[in-house]
Image (cartoon, coloured by chain):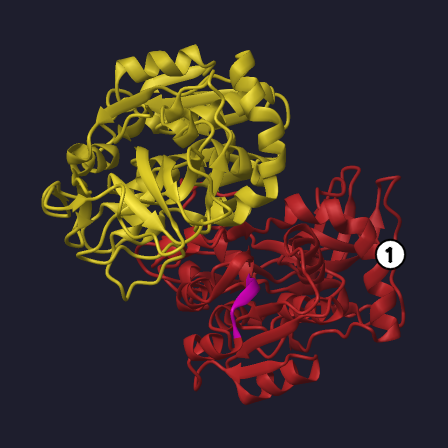
Chain colours: A red, B yellow
Amino acid sequence: MSSTTLNARVLFNAVPQGVPIPGETTVYDSSQTIDLENHPLNGGFLVKTLILSIDPGMRTRMRKPEEKGYVPAYAVGELLEGFGVGIVLRSENPDVAVGQYLQGRGFLYQQYFALPSLPLGMFFLNRDPGVPLTTYVGALGLPGKTAWAGWKEFSRPKKGETAFVPSGASAVCSMVIQLAKLDGLKVIASAGSEEKVEYLRQIGVDVAYNYKNVDTRGVLEREGPIDICWDTVGGDALNAALDNAAVGARFLECGQMTILNKVGSRALIIENPMPTMGKGVSINFISSPLHIPKHLAEFNRTVPAALIKGTLVRSPEDVRHGLECVGETIRAVQMGETKGKAVVVVGEEA
Amino acid sequence: MSSTTLNARVLFNAVPQGVPIPGETTVYDSSQTIDLENHPLNGGFLVKTLILSIDPGMRTRMRKPEEKGYVPAYAVGELLEGFGVGIVLRSENPDVAVGQYLQGRGFLYQQYFALPSLPLGMFFLNRDPGVPLTTYVGALGLPGKTAWAGWKEFSRPKKGETAFVPSGASAVCSMVIQLAKLDGLKVIASAGSEEKVEYLRQIGVDVAYNYKNVDTRGVLEREGPIDICWDTVGGDALNAALDNAAVGARFLECGQMTILNKVGSRALIIENPMPTMGKGVSINFISSPLHIPKHLAEFNRTVPAALIKGTLVRSPEDVRHGLECVGETIRAVQMGETKGKAVVVVGEEA
């Protein structure tokens, strides 16, 4: 006896020139089906995808295969892959039980997929029923862990210092802002809408402004100098922050949104390096595979409890439904249009 | 009774567009005289200049006054100022004794000059007769202290790692190379002549090559990846090193010779930032006023003794004579033509 079920998926279709275009950079494909009861496992296990994360960093994988990078490039014609949450439906692998929740990297952008064993970066998840499932791709997933690890590795905060977090309403940045406030810092942060600016104020930002109406350079000249900058955007905001850096300032670089979607050269340009050199600034690139393992035990001891207790709050989520909206969500994330951490619900738990 | 003595000097004359031009960027002026016995001191003291350093960093001060910088810009029509060694000829200041040697910053590029009190960065020098006077602007002066402080602050060396020092034959870099070898590192270094390459081998460089004949990128692909890069040049060498950086690599930025003498934009450009981001590299700008004080006590306990013992060796010196050659020496330093630390002997000790 066999029955077939739709097994929709999202394929990488073409390397984008600038911002990824839904239907062109990626395509939704509903031509596949799967027999859930009889699909051959060959000693492996079958995963039902529940949640997929749409991370800003997916853009770095949408490159030509000959371009080097730390995370592998997506191959044209193959499935997208990234961070998610899933549940095991069937298993022939003695280490993996049916009903087990899984979290982390290595999720294919498909409703159901088989794996021989746990890939690097995918972990068993002890689901806390008090926490929404989407939290495991947000504050308790890569964004939260990246924020925690980068902050612990490089920030060296001193009470009374000033931190600047441009485009601060993202999942990563909102965790950073809360860590900075817990460390006793004055925090300056920007966002692209009044709604996000209001959210920044709610999580404790001292100087919150809309970068579409207010000049960053002017704000930093008045409210700086900057001791710590958590930068996910690069470009003008990075250069304004460098020009307003304090002596001995630490820059934590966690993505370069303005570079990734540029057509043509993607060079990182420091316009006016001489004062930066003189001020002894350090510019530190955060690598989640490198830095998270070092700080994960402390994260696990601290952050889940703090979220339940309310010392830390989850960032807003922009929850969308169905694999067919993955392409549009990728575009919206790159354009900064999403209202919080972008998550796609692919399957139901029950 | 009075007698006049020539008091030659070097003036900053015009902001250079690219490499400083002797006689145009700076001018030698022999129109001044001084009455050494009767020159009014007004409670201060009179210094005879013995040694002046021609530092690569002097170029950063040859900028328009409106350009910001950590070290003040030279004013057109005023004396050059920088690092030197001198001796006190006369004093009305009870804290400063006749015959006292002085070392550090705040030296005017003139044969004799009066000061009211010790400027910031100028120190009394307990002269060791076993050490040539020029050492106090080299291994025991700013270059040696900068190398020491930057290395201690940012390198975090692990035995067996690989360091890369482009243009490694300078006073700063030759100290860095020796510190790296003492820490058990493999060292790759380049220079612009066979003579300098041979010197690099003598101080322990494992892979020494002439960058005028050998492609840096090829060397780093064969001999890398690079865990630590001590960079005084920027540009292509920096980008080749970033592209061949190991995961978690530390870059120590100590000047950007290729940028300083560029006509037009002086932006620092990282051509291919995405792999650098993924590898969690940190880029640390060394600021001698910020970092030297933190590590000076350990320097003073260690380096003078190591030089006398021979554990550390002084870098070669390019010793020139007379203030009239300052302009040409500044040009030669910026062009990498000097054979070791550039020093101008201005006066005799006796």
Q: Position of residue A141 (x, y in %)?
A: 72, 60
Q: Give the residue type at disc 1.
A: Arg
Given residues A63 and B38, the one toward you in this image is B38
Report crowding for label 1: few under 14, some 14 to 19, many 20 or more residues within 10 A (C-alpha).
few
- Give the residue at mark 1: A301
In this view, B88 is above or below A138: above
Q: Where is the C terminus of chain A found, in terms of image quarters?
A: bottom right
Residue A226 highlighted magenta (yes or no)? yes
What residue is rendered at 47% in x and 29% in y? B140
Q: Position of residue A15 (x, y in %)?
A: 40, 54
Q: Main secondary structure of the magenta part?
A: strand
Q: Quadrant of residue B91?
A: top left
What residue is rendered at 88% in x and 57% in y? A126
Q: Position of residue A296 (x, y in %)?
A: 77, 50
What residue is rendered at 41% in x and 12% in y? B201
Q: Position of residue B252 (x, y in %)?
A: 48, 40
In this view, A198 is above or below A94: below
Q: In the figure, is residue B215 to the left or right of B276?
A: left
In this view, B192 is above or below A111: above
- In the rendered image, is residue B310 in sight? yes
What residue is rendered at 53% in x and 42% in y? B292
Residue A281 highlighted magenta (yes or no)? no
Q: Chain of mark 1?
A: A
Q: Quadrant of residue B138?
A: top left
Q: In the figure, is residue B182 to the left or right of B199?
A: right
- In the rendered image, is residue A350 in sight? no
Q: Secondary structure at mark 1?
A: helix
Residue stretch in magenta: A224-230
Q: In the figure, is residue A33 to the left or right of A24?
A: right
Q: Where is the N terminus of chain A found, in terms of image quarters?
A: bottom right
